[in-house]
Image (cartoon, coloured by chain):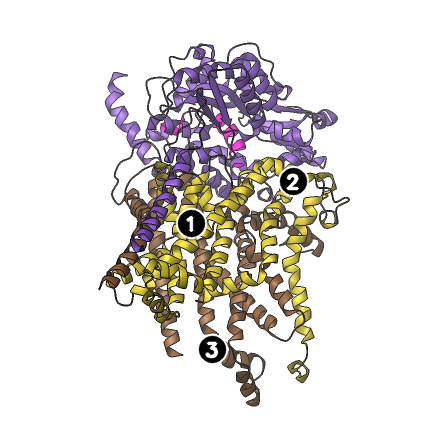
């Protein structure tokens, strides 16, 4: 009797554990179709991707597609990578995370993908430049780009006869004019630290070399030297913002701008859908941040906002390519750029949103420079450092810390770059 | 102090306590009022924010339920909390029993006791990253894993409670059962387990409250699975709310209601349980 | 003899699987975390052994330093605020008042609510309502959001932490006060002890054990503060409210500093153990004296 009871108890515990493990492993139904899972990092485009997912599944019998658009996807992706649980395709931005993923060998070489031929070469170059050390192969299919500069309230501008500035001086005069009319020139949402980067990037492309981070990694220059002007001009910008810009977040700032509380909002084109959701009637246009002293210095701050990468781990590369083909169909891209106010990376006739009118010449000329923060390691939290700087207003302290932190956070990267230079330097 | 206060009601204190209640009631009132309003009713003035809504429409709640997948999150929260509580009572009381009856005369058990109880000092922060990896390797990156982790995390505290409680239960009770020929295992379930009922209530209350409100464990273990617990859903859908604070507050209120109902129904047990847990 | 063997076997059969479970999800990850702390692991890809570099960096990293400073300041101030208020509240709730159980029940509500949601509600309060109130009262300091200022953001977090913790501590103090027998007071009032004196010399010494419990509970919980930070500030403004747990989560899980933050977690663990050990020795000594 006793023995049996104990045996029962042991079996019970065993069963419980087994049940737990089964519940953990099970749950996935096998439908005989190839499963393709995409995780993409733009929650604001969730609706678009939901529709696309539905359409794809309705028209394809052999592949079942799931697209996840979680909030805070970069954390979720990192967590999943930590767990070695890779989706088939990831949709992320062309930034340092991408560089790390290429370096870690998580992404598959897609240079054999046919669709790459239709992608504008400027964007493929941007992707190439993001690789920490030049790596054989192509690891991303650029989908859409964004542009950052200054959004402005077209109606307000026309009403008062304000003109688009082409130099820093003109911008400052414009701000004074706007202020004298009793209108707030800029709105900021600096409570969300990342928004501090938007004006920073669009000024830095005008004022600092485009490959400043790589130059620093090679030990050729310092940020104290290259970013001094950007920092000083940023502080001037702050004078024309709301009284306490650190009290409000991105959503609050979008709402305020949409309600006409400010004439301009220095942010990326990606903010337009959010603004229009508050005030669908609003007449928005944009212009390139004129941070330089001459108009020639200006360049459009534009980078790859969303590209798709196939993971090395994905067992279904062919099916993944088929999904990519579908995503890259002209009408789907057009739908995306209408929806999100984005710039297509694919060659072809696309109709750009009217909010990009002011930037159109730059886009057509290809006068574009990638976001500088795409090279900043995320753990260095440059956005928060800029926020600190905007609160303390101490340029020297900020830049010194920037230089010091850069060396520390990029130690492994710098070592890698230098090793690469030593091995490959002579050949070039 | 006036002599009056020695007998009868102390009205000064009563009134002060009523005033003090404002600090509790105000945030809750604010939540309810905002949750029922429409964005157009929200003006920038205090009166605009805090006045009663024009109509008590449930449309915000309906929308919030859709946005946050409320019923699914609620189901997950209930499931995780329920299973954790049951497993905790069974497993931790057994462990407390084995330890409580042996640690006085056995080096092994007093070592096991110290080993487990010292787990109380391990902050989740240090376990979080390795656990994210480990649970995934074991195929436990889901609610099952979360439950197992809770059973482990609350083990130190609960074993401490149970083994402490056991010292008050005389051995004679067990001996009597044993004389009748019952096995130790049987004796435990027939005699000891029922006697520890007050402790079960305490453990259930403490574990349930902690599990229900915990964010970090599901955040680290379950993120990306598409499954949420109620608090986790608030975190994950924060951007979907945008500046529609009315929708957000409707969702917050929905997340608070289950635990408030539970509290109103079992107030006495909860207060007792919490005090017992802390004081023992 | 057989009986004893049967008993021993049962105990072992209970202990071993449960102990295995505990080791699997507590001890093993603890050791793995310790191992990762010697690498430059990002959380994915391959990694190198870097020896003690992470630990050396920890002590020269101002961000880690300021997160410790913030967390300790928060813990100490919140603990003091919470204990003072809840002791007063407990004395009030224990005196002769109307609707005693209603008040006790009502004052405990904050404790059952989830910290994250409470944080979100207070976030709105601090951003929109308090500044308006400040303007109405003509107070310049309050007319801008407390959360946007590096000097005041941590105070807002103290308020939210205390709001919830007071409920718990009050209940514990009340149960302490109930152990004080009536005749102690009667004896006291014969000696003419009143008010503050009565509290200091009669009541407080009797509830010292409960005071100790509250201190231990408070410090430990506040040192691990996470939800409130997540809901109120996400570490801002200017990284001034990054708690240790938040920094480890944020940079370790999503920021690519898996190895480095593992080292931070190891140090944090040691700090917690040291504090708990000190607290226990002190309270043990105090109880001996009494």
The residue under the point 57% across, 20% down is: A336
Q: Position of residue A397 (x, y in %)?
A: 44, 43
The residue under the point 56% across, 43% down is: B74
**Chain ID for brown:** C
Residue named by callout 3: C205
Q: Provide the secondary structure element on which disc 2 rests.
A: helix
Q: Is residue A213 magenta?
A: yes
For mark 1, does the 10 Å Cα neighbourhood hold few (<14), some (14 to 19), or many (20 or more) residues? many
Label drawn at residue B150: 1
Q: Position of residue C258 (x, y in %)?
A: 36, 40
The one nearer the camera, A23 or B181, is B181
**Chain ID for yellow:** B
The one nearer the camera, B233 or A410, is B233
Q: Position of residue B127 (x, y in %)?
A: 36, 47
For mark 2, does the 10 Å Cα neighbourhood hold few (<14), some (14 to 19), or many (20 or more) residues? many
Which region is colored magenta? A196-215
Residue named by callout 2: B247
Q: Indicate the colour of chain A.
A: purple
The one nearer the camera, A316 or A268, is A316
Q: How many marks?
A: 3
Q: Is residue A146 visible?
A: yes
Q: Are marks 3 and 2 on the same chain?
A: no
Which image quadrant is residue B141 in? top left
Q: Dot 1 falls on which chain?
A: B
């Amino acid at each position: 009797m006793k023995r049996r009871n104990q045996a029962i108890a042991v079996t019970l515990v065993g069963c419980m554990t087994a049940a737990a493990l089964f519940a953990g492993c099970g749950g996935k139904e096998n439908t005989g179709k190839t499963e393709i899972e995409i995780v993409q990092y733009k929650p604001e485009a969730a609706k678009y991707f939901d529709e696309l997912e539905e359409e794809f599944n309705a028209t394809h019998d052999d592949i079942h597609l799931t697209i996840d658009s979680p909030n805070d996807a970069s954390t979720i992706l990192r967590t999943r990578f930590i767990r070695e649980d890779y989706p088939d395709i990831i949709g992320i931005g062309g930034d340092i995370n991408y560089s790390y993923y290429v370096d870690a060998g998580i992404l598959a070489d897609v240079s054999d993908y046919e669709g790459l031929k239709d992608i504008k070469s400027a964007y493929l170059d941007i992707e190439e430049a993001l690789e920490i050390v030049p790596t054989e192969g192509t690891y991303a299919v650029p989908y859409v780009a964004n542009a950052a500069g200054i959004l402005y309230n077209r109606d307000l501008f026309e009403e008062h006869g304000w003109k688009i500035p082409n130099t820093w001086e003109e911008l400052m005069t414009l701000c004074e004019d706007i202020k004298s009319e009793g209108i707030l020139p800029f709105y900021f949402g600096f409570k969300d630290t990342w928004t501090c980067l938007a004006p920073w990037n669009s000024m830095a492309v005008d004022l600092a070399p485009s490959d400043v981070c790589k130059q620093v990694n090679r030990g050729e220059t310092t940020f104290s030297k290259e970013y001094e002007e950007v920092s000083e001009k940023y502080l001037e910008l702050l004078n024309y913002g709301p009284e306490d810009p650190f009290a409000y977040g991105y959503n609050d700032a979008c709402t305020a701008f949409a309600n006409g509380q400010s004439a301009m909002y220095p942010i990326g084109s990606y903010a337009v859908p959010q603004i229009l959701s508050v005030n669908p009637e609003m007449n928005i246009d944009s212009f390139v941040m004129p941070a330089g002293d001459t108009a020639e210095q200006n360049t459009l701050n534009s980078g790859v906002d969303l590209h798709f990468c196939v993971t090395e781990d994905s067992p279904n590369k062919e099916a993944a390519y088929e999904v990519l083909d579908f995503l890259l169909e002209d009408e789907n891209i057009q739908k995306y750029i209408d929806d999100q106010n984005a710039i297509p990376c694919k060659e072809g006739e696309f109709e750009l949103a009217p909010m990009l009118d002011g930037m159109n010449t730059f886009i057509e000329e290809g006068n574009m420079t990638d976001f500088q923060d795409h090279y900043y390691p995320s753990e260095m939290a440059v956005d928060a450092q800029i926020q600190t700087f905007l609160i303390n207003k101490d340029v020297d302290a900020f830049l010194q810390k920037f230089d010091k932190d850069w060396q520390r956070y990029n130690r492994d990267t710098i070592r890698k770059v230098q090793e690469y230079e030593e091995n490959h330097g002579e050949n070039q | 102090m006036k002599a009056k206060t020695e007998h009868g009601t102390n009205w000064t204190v009563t009134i002060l306590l009523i005033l003090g209640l404002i600090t509790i009631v105000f945030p809750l009132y604010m939540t309810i009022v905002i949750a029922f309003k429409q964005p157009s009713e929200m003006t920038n003035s205090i009166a605009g924010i805090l006045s009663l809504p024009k109509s008590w429409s449930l449309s915000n709640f309906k929308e919030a339920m859709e946005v946050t997948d409320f019923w699914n999150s609620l189901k997950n929260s209930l499931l995780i909390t329920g299973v954790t509580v049951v497993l905790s009572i069974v497993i931790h009381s057994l462990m407390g029993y084995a330890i409580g009856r042996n640690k006085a005369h056995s080096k092994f058990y007093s070592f096991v006791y110290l080993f487990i109880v010292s787990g109380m000092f391990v902050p989740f922060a240090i376990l979080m990253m390795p656990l994210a990896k480990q649970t995934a390797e074991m195929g436990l990156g889901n609610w099952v894993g979360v439950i197992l982790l809770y059973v482990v995390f609350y083990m130190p505290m609960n074993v401490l409670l149970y083994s402490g409680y056991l010292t008050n239960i005389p051995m004679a009770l067990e001996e009597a059962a044993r004389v009748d020929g019952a096995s130790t295992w049987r004796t435990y379930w027939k005699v000891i387990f029922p006697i520890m009922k007050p402790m079960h209530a305490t453990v259930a209350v403490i574990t349930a409250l902690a599990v229900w409100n915990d964010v970090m464990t599901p955040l680290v273990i379950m993120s990306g699975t598409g499954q949420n617990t109620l608090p986790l859903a608030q975190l994950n859908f924060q951007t979907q709310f945008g500046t529609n604070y009315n929708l957000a507050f409707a969702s917050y209120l929905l997340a608070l209601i289950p635990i408030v109902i539970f509290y109103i129904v079992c107030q006495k047990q909860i207060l007792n349980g919490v005090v017992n847990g802390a004081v023992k | 003899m057989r009986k004893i063997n049967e008993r021993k076997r049962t105990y072992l059969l209970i202990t071993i699987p449960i102990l295995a479970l505990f080791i699997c999800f507590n001890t093993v990850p603890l050791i793995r975390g310790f191992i990762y702390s010697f690498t430059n692991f990002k959380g994915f890809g391959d990694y190198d052994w870097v020896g003690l570099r992470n630990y050396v960096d920890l002590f020269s990293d101002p961000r880690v330093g300021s997160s410790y400073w913030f967390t300790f300041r928060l813990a100490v101030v919140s603990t003091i605020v919470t204990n003072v208020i809840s002791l007063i509240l407990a004395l009030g709730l224990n005196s002769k008042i109307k609707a005693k159980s209603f008040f006790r029940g009502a004052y405990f509500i904050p404790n059952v609510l989830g910290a994250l949601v409470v944080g979100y509600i207070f976030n709105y309060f601090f951003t929109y309502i308090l500044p308006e109130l400040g303007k109405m009262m003509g107070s310049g300091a309050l007319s801008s959001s407390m959360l946007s200022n590096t000097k005041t953001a941590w105070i807002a977090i103290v308020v939210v932490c205390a709001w919830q913790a007071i409920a718990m501590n009050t209940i514990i103090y009340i149960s302490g006060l109930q152990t004080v027998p009536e005749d102690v007071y009667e004896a006291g009032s014969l000696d003419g002890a009143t008010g503050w004196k009565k509290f200091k010399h009669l009541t407080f010494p009797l509830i010292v054990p409960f005071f100790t419990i509250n201190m231990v509970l408070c410090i430990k919980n506040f040192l691990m503060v996470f939800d409130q930070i997540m809901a109120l500030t996400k570490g801002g403004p200017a990284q001034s409210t990054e708690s240790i747990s938040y920094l480890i989560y944020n940079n370790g899980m999503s920021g690519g500093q898996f190895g480095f933050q593992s080292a931070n977690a190891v140090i944090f663990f040691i700090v917690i153990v040291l504090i708990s050990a000190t607290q226990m020795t002190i309270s043990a000594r105090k109880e001996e004296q009494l």
